[in-house]
Amino acid sequence: MKKEEVISAKELTKIYRRGSEEIHALNDVSFAIRKGEFVAVVGPSGSGKTTMLNLIGCLDTPTRGSLRLNGTEISGLKEKDLVKLRRENIGFVFQQFFLLPTLTVRENIELPLLFNRKDGYKSKIDEIIGLVGLKARAEHLPSQLSGGEMQRVAIGRALVNEPKIILADEPTGNLDSATALKIFELFRNLNSQGLTLIIVSHNLELAKIAHRKIYLRDGQVV
Ligand code: ADP
Ligand code: MG
């Protein structure tokens, strides 16, 4: 039986305009990602990796083509519905961590729940802190953490709304290779618990940890 497709893109195209210049960041790209897959997106700088991730994550909208997220066609959705779809499905992790410096590890992870706290959220936060390996650091500030620990906080924050898909854009780009490997092992662990992962990486060694690679070049899948 064919497993459920959580993402399905058909002839997905993104054209940026810079003055009179048209930049074809993604060109007629088609792909599908099934529930529970761990996919690495690789390719040279400027090949469209970030554009692809931002479209999947509803941070940007395609110029043309079809993109279905959990069965919902995103083109033509109103901003409000796009935000809802993103919140219910997607967790984001970035290269630069984007932690708030005056908040502790625990508070940074809690942040997405600021306006949406359900009973028992504190035990959920404790569980996530354990899952990302930060039990001993929960009350520390970001300035007291290593790069790897900061990225663990960002991963914890991405998990807090119980997303179905985690999108990570060069999550280990600022980390040394031993730390990067540990972060990929954390991703593998999350994937084995059923989470779908799409991770952009420059590092082909690390990308081998994924089940499958999507290679991009000049805005096309090769
Ligand atoms: P990658 O993440 O693989 O390095 P990107 O998706 O960031 O590639 O970029 C793909 C192409 O689109 C590049 O040529 C880049 O300069 C261009 N591009 C990306 N974002 C914008 C933007 N907001 N405005 C104009 N051009 C952009
Ligand atoms: Mg990029």
Image (spheres, grey):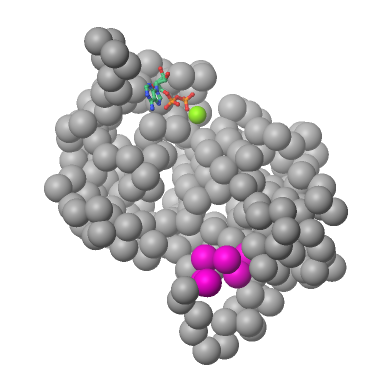
Q: Is residue 153 visible?
A: yes
Q: Nearer the viewer, residue 200 or 92?
A: 92
Measuring 24% from the left and 28% from the top, which residue is drawn there? 13
- On the rendered image, what quadrant is the N terminus found in? bottom left
The quadrant holding residue 221 is top left
Measuring 24% from the left and 60% from the top, which residue is drawn there? 81
Measuring 25% from the left and 59% from the top, which residue is drawn there? 80
Q: Nearer the viewer, residue 3 or 171?
A: 171
The quadrant holding residue 144 is bottom right
Magenta stretch, main secondary structure, is helix
**Picture layout, residue 116 above or below residue 218:** below
Left of 61 or right of it: where is 217?
right
Left of 173 or right of it: where is 216?
left
The quadrant holding residue 95 is top right
Residue 205 drawn at (x, y percent) = 65, 31
**Magenta-colored stretch includes residue 120:** no
Left of 151 or right of it: where is 53?
left
Residue 208 drawn at (x, y percent) = 59, 36
Magenta-drawn segment: 109-114
